[in-house]
Image (spheres, rainbow, N blue to C red):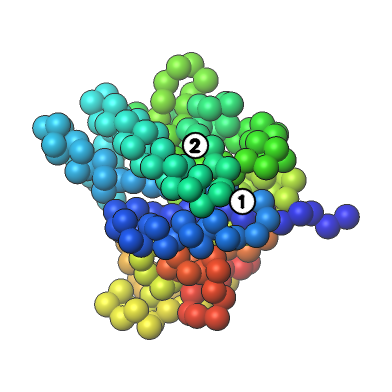
Amino acid sequence: MAKEKLSIVKIGGNVIEDDTALKAFLERFSKLKGKKILVHGGGKRATHIASKLGIPSNMVNGRRITDADTLEVITMVYGGLVNKNIVAKLQGLDVDAIGLTGADINSIYSEKRPVKDIDFGFVGNVKSVNYTSINKLITASFVPVFCAITHNKLGQLFNTNADTIASELAIGLSKVYDVELSYCFEKNGVLLDVADEDSVLEEIDSKNYKNLKEKGVFHDGMLPKLENCFYALDRGVSKVFIGNPTVISNKNQKFTTLYL
């Protein structure tokens, strides 16, 4: 028997910061047919709030060093301000959304990122997704909205990369559903030239990805996203798309499709 479709959409980048862009995206998401999950970031908002509170933001290779003070800001901003605003806006669009961290219903378990060259502090690496509990919400017709926070089952919250959370949710729920994963941000897709919005690589398979990566084609910020994409495809996710927010509703324009 064919599995039912589940759409998992991760929204991030400047779209979260732009009220007009976010409104347009959420309207599209509300019209997306079938079962669905939304995952969001919020790093720029966290940096802004931390600055207001006099807490410096320390980034290394695009990753945030998360000390105790920063974790408090992350929890307030991701789990509170951003998450609940998105949930409220979706409710206004007749989507019965429920905001979640990985600690809620023990949905996403992580362990602290091991210290190698850098101690990232309270940053988690996802170890397991409790897809059975999440599926109870989905089958009850709720739409989960996950922020970028996980936990270690011992009372500790972790800042966790939102792209990774989306990928791990997609892998876990692929045991039950035919999962399509979409990464939405302000760009039209994976670009050959970050200054040229029309230089979209419309298809990338795993072999082509390795070749292009060796040639240094991809922008540093895109590499972790692509790694998450192919990791998901290799572990049961049906399709992965990268593009601007219209990718979830308009398959006629340019965007990037990834496959093995």
Residue 238 is situated, as x and y percent measured from the top left of the image, at 67, 60
Considering only order in the chain, which callout, 1 or 2, is on the residue closer to the N terminus? 1
For residue 159, say whether it is visible: no
Q: Amino acid at mark 1?
A: Lys
Q: Is residue 62 left or right of residue 10?
A: left
Residue that sits furthest to the bottom in the current view:
198
**Image quadrant in which the C terminus is located:** bottom right
Kindly identify which residue carries mark 2: 99
User: Which residue is drawn at the image coordinates 31% and 81% (left, top)?
Assistant: 196
Q: Residues within 10 Å of mark 1 (few under 14, many from 20)?
A: many
Question: For residue 85, which quarter of the picture?
Answer: top left
For residue 72, say whether it is visible: yes
Kindly identify which residue carries mark 1: 36
User: Which residue is drawn at the image coordinates 55% and 81% (left, top)?
Assistant: 252
Label 2 secondary element: strand
Q: Nearer the viewer, residue 82 or 181?
A: 82
**Image quadrant in which the N terminus is located:** bottom right
Q: Nearer the viewer, residue 111 or 51?
A: 51
Q: Amino acid at mark 2?
A: Gly
Q: Is residue 176 left or right of residue 198?
A: right
Residue 193 is situated, as x and y percent measured from the top left of the image, at 32, 78
* Circles 2 and 1: CB atoms closer than 8 Å: no
Q: Nearer the viewer, residue 126 or 181?
A: 181
Instruction: Judge whether 117 appears above or below 90 on screen.
Output: above
Q: Nearer the viewer, residue 228 or 36?
A: 36
Residue 144 is situated, as x and y percent measured from the top left of the image, at 56, 41
User: Which residue is drawn at the image coordinates 56% and 49% (left, top)?
Assistant: 94
Question: For residue 115, which quarter of the picture?
Answer: top left
Instruction: Judge whether 86 appears above or below 207 on screen.
Output: above
Label 1 secondary element: strand
Q: Residues within 10 Å of mark 2 (few under 14, many from 20)?
A: many
Instruction: Judge whether 196 appears above or below 162 on screen.
Output: below
